[in-house]
Image (cartoon, coloured by chain):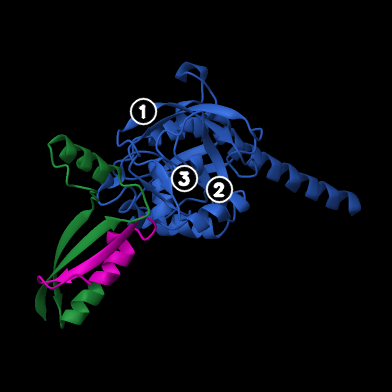
Chain colours: A blue, B green
């Protein structure tokens, strides 16, 4: 069972939904308060959506200095899986764990509606159960969702296949290259602007987001199966 | 130690779309200020800083900008000390 730490900042408001989505996928998910520094042997860390610290200065700018972020950074640098959803994505960019930054939507309005995103990369801890090219309907709810990077970094992201999700049909916020989510060079840190935790059951209008959470569990199961096989092989050889 | 007032101007990078500035520009045009060719909109922070010298006050303010007050991916900044020209 994957241990999933959902970080709670003052102003997080998708923490409970995210915890519920991880548990629905079979994970052992729990909250970690932003002042705590112990991630309690988390396999996966999720920074949920919301408006941490009221989005003062810039979205995610203050949350980045929370006590827990040093532990999240150490977890990420050690190769541990980290997912940032919406405000969590903004925090990961501010913390330098993901490239780029998120600015005010091109048409200024706060947008809360479903969008369509295409899964462009499936070799991340959060997309392994999707098919490449699959189009998902997942809602956005953001005012600062326009992903920006300089032209050189954008070219690098494309060349290294680091764009994980891309808006299709329309680009709601003016993001560079229609980017809805990216991963780092190590492919263990992932950020997404839409909210997969809001589409993980038919009662919520669809379940296109559910496999983001099931993917974490699948990764764990694969790892576990490999461990068991390794033990068995050794046993056979002995 | 002397008290210095450092003014920080943070602006969206020139190459990036500034929708807030554009909205203000459109509103000015609607009011008849057709001479306005372009509006860019940023932030202005005023810091009262204790430091041993002007240079130290500026150096500390620069460190604050690099670590927190401006995002180097999306913003540029400049500093002005007690009404001097920005640097």
To which residue does mark 2 refer? A43
User: Tag 1, which secondary structure?
Assistant: strand
Name above or below for residue B54 compared with residue A37. Answer: below
- Name the spot of residue A149 as percent of width and height, x first: 45, 53
Q: Numbered disc 2: what chain?
A: A
Q: How many marks?
A: 3
Q: Position of residue A61 (x, y in %)?
A: 32, 53
Q: On the rendered image, what quadrant is the C terminus of chain B found in?
A: bottom left
- Chain of the residue under the numbered disc 3 shown in the image: A
Nearest to the eye among marks 1 and 2: give it.
1
Marks 1/2: CA–CA distance = 31 Å
On the same chain, marks 1 and 2? The answer is yes
* Mark closest to the chain's N terminus, 1 or 2: 2
Residue for badge 1: A112
- Residue A210 image-quadrant placement: top right
Whether residue A7 appears in this view of the structure is no
Query: Which is nearer the eye, A199 or A21?
Result: A199
């Amino acid at each position: 069972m994957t241990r999933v730490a959902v970080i709670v900042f003052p102003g997080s408001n998708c923490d409970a939904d995210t915890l519920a989505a991880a548990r629905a996928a079979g994970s052992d998910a729990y909250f970690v308060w932003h002042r705590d520094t112990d991630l309690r042997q988390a396999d996966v860390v999720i920074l949920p959506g919301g408006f941490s610290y009221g989005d003062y200065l810039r979205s995610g700018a203050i949350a980045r200095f929370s006590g827990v972020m040093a532990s999240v950074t150490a977890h990420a640098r050690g190769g541990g899986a980290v997912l940032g959803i919406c405000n969590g994505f903004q925090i990961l960019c501010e913390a330098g764990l993901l490239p780029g930054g998120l600015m005010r939507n091109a048409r200024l309005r706060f947008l809360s509606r479903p969008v369509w995103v295409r899964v462009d990369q499936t070799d991340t801890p959060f997309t392994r159960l999707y098919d490449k090219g699959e189009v998902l309907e997942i809602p956005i709810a953001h005012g600062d969702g326009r992903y920006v990077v300089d032209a050189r970094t954008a070219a690098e992201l494309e060349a290294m296949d680091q764009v994980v999700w891309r808006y299709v049909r329309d680009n709601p916020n003016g993001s560079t290259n229609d980017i809805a989510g990216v991963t780092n060079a190590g492919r263990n840190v992932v950020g997404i602007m839409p909210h997969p935790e809001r589409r993980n059951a038919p009662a919520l209008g669809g379940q296109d987001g559910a496999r983001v959470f099931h993917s974490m569990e699948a990764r764990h199961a694969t790892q576990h199966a490999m461990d068991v096989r390794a033990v068995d092989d050794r046993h056979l050889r002995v | 130690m002397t008290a210095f007032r450092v003014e920080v101007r943070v602006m969206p990078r020139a190459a990036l779309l500034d929708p807030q500035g554009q909205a203000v520009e459109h509103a000015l045009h609607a009011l008849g200020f057709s001479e306005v060719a372009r509006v860019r909109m940023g932030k202005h922070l005023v810091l009262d800083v204790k430091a041993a010298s002007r240079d130290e006050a500026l150096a500390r303010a620069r460190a604050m900008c690099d670590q927190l007050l401006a995002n180097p991916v999306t913003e540029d900044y400049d500093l002005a000390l007690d009404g001097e020209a920005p640097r």
